[in-house]
Image (cartoon, rainbow, N blue to C red):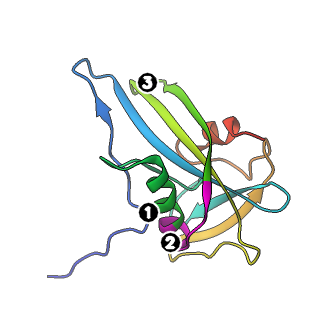
Amino acid sequence: MATTPAPLHPPSPTNYTNSDGLGLRLQCFLVIRDAARKIACVQLKGTVGWSLPGETLQPNESPDATATRVAHQWFGISLPSQLVAVQSYPEDGDRKWYLLFIYEAQAPAKGLPLLDDTAKVTFAAPGSPPGTFAMDHGTVFGRLPP
């Protein structure tokens, strides 16, 4: 029987829901800045829109560990990072509250490597997105510290 390899950026279904159906989603975004403080935005193959490197925290995973995992999953590298903000907002319509751990890292001088499922990476100035974002990433981009 043939097997299908797992995607490099699998969906992260980890949500916490109470008995009333109100959910909490814990997410970690890695804001990678270039020398001009522009923000790395990624376009994955086969998707519409831009993404910010980020993942949902897995059970018993710390935000620091998630930030490390994000660098490995999205670029195959280690990037020292630090927590710069914690933000939250409700998502209209899906009865979830999002809690975001925002980490920041410096882009390597040679640029960010592209993995097999990455179409391209561009750096965008805060407040000037490169185009339409996928999922809730536009909301996150608009809330990033300058």
Q: Does the magenta portion include 78?
A: yes
Camera-nearest residue between 15 and 61: 61
Residue 80 falls within the magenta-colored stretch: yes
Q: Residue at x 60, y 70 (%)?
A: 119
Q: Is residue 35 left or right of residue 72?
A: right
Tag 1 near tag 2, CB within 8 Å:
yes
Q: Which mark is residue 9?
A: 1
**Residue 107 locus on image (x, y percent):** 71, 66
Q: Tell me: residue 77, above or below residue 48.
A: below
Circle 3 is placed at which residue position? 93
Range of the magenta residues? 72-81
The N terminus: image quadrant: bottom left
Picture coordinates of residue 146, whole percent (x, y): 78, 41
**Between discs 1 and 3, the one toward the N terminus:** 1
Write down the residue under mark 2.
117
Q: Secondary structure at mark 3?
A: loop
